[in-house]
Image (cartoon, grey):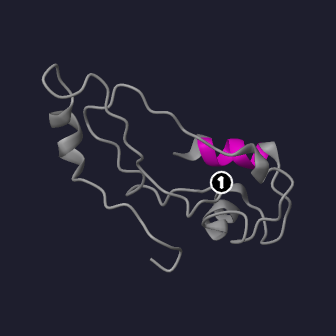
Amino acid sequence: SPHGPRAVGIPSEWAGQLQGPSVAHVVVVEADGSRKLPFKAPRIPREPVVPAEADVVAVVVGLDCLGTALEETYVCRADVVAEITSSKHGDIVVPEMVGKVLGSA
């Protein structure tokens, strides 16, 4: 990847096969990376890929994105965030912006 080394994922159907008394009681799956940035908008409907067997989904946003500029330097897919939130490139990331993105998925 142009953003550095990446882990190779497993097929999504494997997650359900790994969970069980003989292998693991809990399986944690990172469904969508953000190039090590604190905030990202998914490209819906193909992201994030969540295994069908998932019981719990935790959405994570780094609060250090607040107060930064809506630019690729600080926000993964700043263009998608701008589209979802009706913002412009360079606007300051505020809690309402994060809420709109989280509510869009």
Image coordinates of residue 44 in percent, x first then y, are 45, 56
Q: Looking at the rendering, in which quadrant would you find the N terminus?
A: bottom left
The residue under the point 82% across, 65% down is 69
Magenta highlight range? 96-102
Q: Name the residue under label 1.
A: 39
The quadrant in which residue 63 appears is top right
Residue 65, position in %: x, y? Answer: 76, 53
Q: What element carries label 1?
A: loop
Return the residue nearer the eye: 16 or 45: 16
Is residue 21 within the magenta segment? no
Left or right: residue 95 compared with residue 85: right
| Front one among 8 and 38 | 8
Q: Quadrant of residue 95?
A: top right
Q: Which amino acid does label 1 sit on?
A: Phe
Q: In front here: 19 or 39?
A: 19
Q: At which x and y percent is residue 98?
A: 71, 46
Q: Taking 25 as reference, is 86 above or below it?
A: below
Q: In this view, does 85 lie above or below 23?
A: below
What residue do we see at 25% from left, 32% from top? 53
